[in-house]
Each structure stands twice: as C-alpha cells, then as structure tokens.
Image (spheres, rainbow, N blue to C red):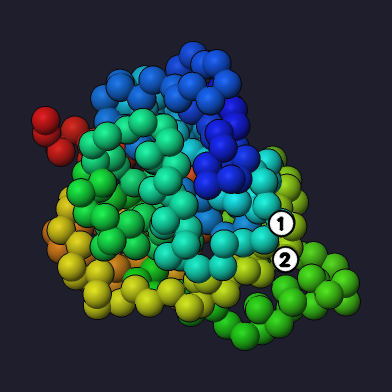
Amino acid sequence: MPQKYFDIDGVATFVHHPGKTTLPEVAPDLGRGEALLCLHGAGNNGHLYSELAEHLATAHSPVSFDQPGHARSGGIDSLGSVSAMADFSLAVLERLGVGGPVVWVGHSMGGAVAMEVALRAPDRVRALVVCSTPATFGVPDFMLDGLRRVTEGKDRRRFERAVYSPATPDAIVHRGFMEDVKTDPRVMYGDLLACRDWTGGERLQEIDVPALVVHGADELAPLKTGSEQLAEILPGAQLEVIPDAGHMVPIEQPEVLAARIGAFLEGLGS
C-alpha cells in the first residue's frame, strides 16, 4: 500500500492508504465503497492493517496511520489518553478530506479510541468494527511495573508469544515483534496507562451505530470475556469469533477478518 506523511496538528503523521500514490499533502482517493479509518493498538502502528487493507481495498477504501510517537509518525511520547487519541484521529479524518461518516475499525486500544469517537462525534461514525477490545481494560500492575523497568533501563524488553494463537506460524509472530520494536517502550507504557484509565463500561450503551465485535478463538481469557461483554453492551452488536487467532487477529487471520468485515459492510446498505 502507498504511504505518505501529512502534517496534522503539527505532527508528521505517517498514513497508509489504498490506490495510487498522490503528491505531497494531497489526500488519497477514498471514494471506493465504504471509507474505513483503521486504528492500531498499544505500542503498534498502522502497518498492522497492511494485509487486511489489501483484501478490503478491492471493494472499499481502508486507510490507517501511526499515532504520534508510534513507528514512523513524529513525537516521542504517547498522547497519554484515549480521549486525546480520539481527537487526533478525528483530525486525521478531517485532513484526509472525508466529509461524511466513516466506518471506524479499531484493534485493542484502537477499538477504545473508535468507541470514544462514536460517543463524542457520532455524526462522523457510520459503523464500528471493534477487534480484540474489552468493554473496560484491566491492565495489571505487574505489567505496568515490568514495562516501567524497561523504560528505566533496568530490564530488557520482552515480546509475548501468548498474545498469538498456538496455530499462528512463527513467521507471523516474528513479523509482529518486528512491528513492535518500531515504537519506543516509553510510548507503549503511556499507551497502557491510557488503556488503564479509559472508562468504557456501561456508557457504551449510548453508542447508536451498527457494530461488529471481533475476537480470536484463542484470545487471552480476560480479553475474550471482556470482548463478549462488550458485544452485550453495544446495542445490536454482532459478535464474530475468528478461529486460529489470538489477540493479534488483523495479522494472524487478515483474509478471514476481511471476509467478516466485508459481509458486515454489505449489511449496512446504502
């Protein structure tokens, strides 16, 4: 997929988009089918969606970006809150020149950001696809403490195989690890604090758009339970379980996920 920078709120923001490349600061054409703005998870980046986007781009216009401080976007820190990330994501949408509502696709932390947008700017949301996201994050202290030690230079950074399905090939796991190292662990730490402090819960009942909630069959137990709870909270949400996938569904099973999303989009009508 073509990639380019846009200046958004003073941040050099790295954007991944379908179709032909365009001149500097010229937005890509997002007029094919549904426009989808894809939001990555904690410590990750927009390249997470590359294969998924290739499948969706045959009929739709998926676009993703690296949040500030992540991978190739400018900045050295996490924005620090889901609300701030929602504001920035809306600014990205504005900069891309999409006037109407779009489909927001969010993975993990990105799902929280998408739902925050739906609460704060419902006129900009046509539908939600929320992948591997609980109704409320429970970030344990031991995880924060361990990552804080990494940011202080007191421990080495660790990459967890457990967030992938046992069925996921090592080559895909390695690719995920390589994406993770593009972002400073201090940014990851800020992201986890943002997830811990985000209050989803029952207020998500206020969201009144079609929603597809997705998790992997081999998702970590607390997150699987949280995703199931989310599907019950969001009015009229559809729940899809992706086989042979853990937490990292978009890179573990991109073709299957694209098919499920495509069917969901067909159901939206005109």
Residue 127 sits above or below residue 55 on the image: below
Q: Quadrant of residue 103?
A: top left
> Looking at the image, which residue is at 80% across and 78% down?
149
> Looking at the image, which residue is at 49% across and 22% down?
26
Badge 1 amino acid: Ile
Q: In the displayed structure, does residue 208 sit left or right of residue 17?
A: left
The residue beneath circle 1 is: 76
Residue lying at the far front in this picture: please name it.
10
Residue lying at the far bottom in this picture: please name it.
141
Pointers 1 and 2 in contact (C-beta within 8 Å): yes
* Image quarter (top left, top right, bottom left or bottom right) of the N terminus: top right
Could you say where residue 18 lies in the image, as x and y percent from the top left? 46, 23
Mark nearest the camera among 1 and 2 is 1
Of pointers 1 and 2, the one earlier in the residue sequence: 1
Q: Nearer the viewer, residue 84 or 193?
A: 84
Spatial separation of the CA atoms under disc 1 and disc 2 = 8 Å
The residue beneath circle 2 is: 186
Q: In the displayed structure, does residue 62 sit left or right of residue 195?
A: left
Badge 2 amino acid: Arg
Could you say where residue 226 lies in the image, as x and y percent from the top left? 37, 72
> Looking at the image, which residue is at 34% across and 62% down?
116
Could you say whether the residue bearing mark 2 is in a helix, strand or loop?
helix
* Circle 1 Cα neighbour tier, 10 Å, few/some/many (<14 / 14–19 / ≥20): some
* Circle 2 Cα neighbour tier, 10 Å, few/some/many (<14 / 14–19 / ≥20): some
Could you say whether the residue bearing mark 1 is in a helix, strand or loop?
loop
> Looking at the image, which residue is at 53% across and 47% down?
9
Could you say where residue 254 lies in the image, as x and y percent from the top left? 47, 38
The reply to whether residue 18 is visible in this rendering is no
Q: Nearer the viewer, residue 148 or 247?
A: 148
The reply to whether residue 157 is visible in this rendering is yes
Residue lying at the far right in this picture: please name it.
154
